[in-house]
Image: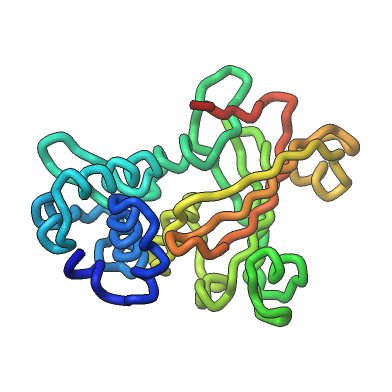
Amino acid sequence: MQGAMSSGTGAQRDLGFRPLYRQVRDVLVKRIAEGVWQAGQALPSEPDLAADLGVSQGTVRKALDEMTAENLVVRRQGRGTYVARHDDARILFQFFKLVPDSGERSFPESRVLEVTKTTDPQATEMLRLRPRDPVLQIDRVRSLQGQACVLERIFLPARLFPRMEFRDLPNNLYELYASDYGVTIGRASEKLKAVAATGRESAALGATPGAPLLQIDRLAYDLDSRPVEWRISLCRTDTAHYWSDLR
């Protein structure tokens, strides 16, 4: 392969046993991660990418198909391929899984309680930081249909999000990460567990102490597969449920 694929012999050796379209996919994802193409920006055409990388147009198309399935790009009929945005619609269906029992999905409202810079041994371990590296801690309450239903604690590497503790935070944090800090969330892994509400959680969510809550432990990764956000969400389940579409 020519162009971008020929740069970096070490990376090329590592990818030598991977299918060619996967190698192309990795190059394109790396370019997005490096800011060559911004969220919402159109990628070059398939023929132009094929010529640039020295591969067939079919190989490029297969790589873009995989990136589309991963929600990294969006194909628009007759208009081209665009870097996916972390807009409310994408967040709602890819990352926010709590749905009111009525079944009507809606993007939650958020109220920030506190943003602090701190050190936290467990957070630094989860985010693969050095033991005393500072992290940002964001505490907020999220509401569905006017009812508080999620208490979140979010940890971020402070070096990736300079001075975030001094600004007003929007509802959609993932879009902020991408637009203002160049950190795009590519995927996340979650662990779910049933817990009982403590006094603090009861006060924040308006729940009875000891009431059952769903704890969602999420680790989110950027396009380079670095862990960049650790989020613990405690969710009321008396009026909502966790919804997942398995395919």
At horizontal 74% and vertical 42% (from top left) the residue drawn is 215
By what rule are the colours in the image chosen?
Answer: rainbow
Describe residue 36's horizontal placement relative to residue 226 as left or right: left
Expressed as whole percent of the image width and height from the top left, the position of residue 225 reads 50, 61
Describe residue 71's horizontal placement relative to residue 80 as left or right: right
Give above or below for 41 relative to 108: below
Give above or below for 120 relative to 214: below
Expressed as whole percent of the image width and height from the top left, the position of residue 116 reads 66, 70
Q: Nearer the viewer, residue 23 or 112?
A: 23
Describe residue 202's horizontal placement relative to residue 126 as left or right: right
Q: Which residue is outermost to the bottom? A: 132
Q: Which residue is outermost to the front? A: 17
Expressed as whole percent of the image width and height from the top left, the position of residue 131 reads 73, 79
Q: Is residue 63 visible?
A: yes
Expressed as whole percent of the image width and height from the top left, the position of residue 206 reads 77, 37
- Tag count: 0
Q: Which residue is outermost to the top? A: 102
Q: Nearer the viewer, residue 148 or 151?
A: 151
Image quarter hosting the N terminus: bottom left
At horizontal 67% and vertical 38% (from top left) the residue drawn is 148
At horizontal 34% and vertical 64% (from top left) the residue drawn is 30
Q: Nearer the viewer, residue 36 or 139?
A: 36
Q: Is residue 115 visible?
A: no
Give above or below for 168 relative to 174: below
At horizontal 49% and vertical 31% (from top left) the residue drawn is 106
